[in-house]
Amino acid sequence: MSDLTTTPFGPTSTASQVIDGVDLRGRRAVVTGGASGIGVETARALAGAGAEVTLAVRDTDAGARVAEDLATDTGNHEVRVAALDLADQASVAAFASAWTGPLHILVNNAGIMAPPETRTAEGWELQFATNHLGHFALSLGLHPALRQAGGARVVSVSSVGHVNGDIDFDDIHFERRAYDKWLAYGQSKTADVLFAVEAAKRWAPDGIAVNALNPGRITGTDLARHIGDVSAAPASFDPTSTDVSWKDVAQGAATSVLLAASPLLDGVTGRYFEDCNEAAPHRPGVRRGVAAYALDTDNAARLWQVSLDLTGRGTRA
């Protein structure tokens, strides 16, 4: 991979630093999972720059508390809360249908990692259903609003965990193979990157930029609530690896905010970033970079069609 996109920022940069001087007044943003972890910091940065921000969350009471805090902290009282359960396609459809007017920024931030084997009402494996299919359906449902905005941006929060595995198109939902929570997590995060690759291609005529990212290993979030101490993760996950440093939530949100709002990335689409710069190809044994299969255009097109079929959206968008 040549001509990687670079910025003046890096692994220790914070969300407020990458958006410093950016004016988002008149822009509207949605942050899924905006009531916890890096979602809060992403929303804080966007609101601080003047955007109207909607926190799309399962727990609206928690969302309301965060919205009040953000309004107080930023002086921006255009911080809203709306219910969204990404594992429930009806909830996703309701959120999208209730949206009116343009949408300039969509940050697909919410996620779940390594739960016990759990299935949705459709029988879908929960991580794939939440991390990918929920965001896929949401993005398609909001596509008209993104197109209306002109120059909209969609941010797909993936993970270095995507290097643990490609999509198993023959058994996405672990119906025939034994459930492995880390393989399931990895394939859901690979799907997040492939979504960006295909959406960037399909939506380029609409002026919509779509990029994916690895936020890094973040302290102070509840993403690891299903595994407790990260040392419980398998060797392949390698949570104690020294090649990737731990970040606080302000640093963890930086790459999301950069992709969502920085003029440095005007015209950049269909890429995968980490530490505020486009990632180099993954090298075996190193917990960095982007796997070739996650950028494969054939994989991306195939996943898009599979996702259309699963969510019942036919051939739309």
Image (cartoon, rainbow, N blue to C red):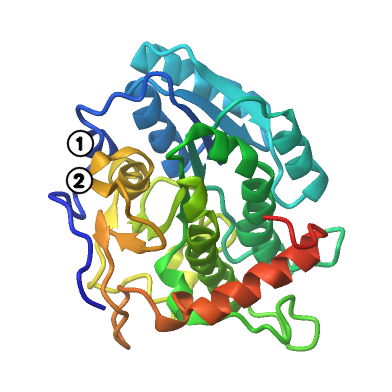
Q: Is residue 243 rendered to the left or right of residue 83?
A: left
Quick one: SS at disc 2?
loop
Q: Position of residue 89 (x, y in %)?
A: 79, 50
Q: Answer left or right for 133 relative to 182.
A: right
Residue at the location (86% across, 62% down)? 122
**Residue 181 in sight here:** no
Q: Which mark is residue 161?
A: none
Residue named by callout 1:
17
Residue 243, horizontal then vertical, whole percent? 23, 72
The secondary element bearing badge 1 is classed as helix
Q: Quadrant of the C terminus?
A: bottom right
Amino acid type at circle 2 is Ser
| Residue 147 location (% of width, % of height) | 55, 40
Report how far apart the C-alphas of labels 2 and 1 lie in the structure: 6 Å
As drawn, 87 above or below 165: above
Quarter of image, res 73:
top left
Image point (56%, 73%), residue name: 300
Q: Residue at position x 40%, y 24% from top?
A: 47
Q: Can residue 135 be seen in the rendering of this structure?
A: yes
Specify whether 1 is left or right of 90: left
Tag of residue 13: 2
Q: Are marks 2 and 1 in contact (CB under 8 Å)?
A: yes
What's the residue type where badge 1 is placed? Gln
Crowdedness near tag 2: few (<14), some (14–19) or many (≥20) residues, C-alpha within 10 Å: some
Determine the image quadrant of residue 93: top right
Q: Is 203 drawn above or below residue 308 in the view shown?
A: above
Badge 1: residue crowd in 10 Å (few <14, some 14–19, many ≥20): some
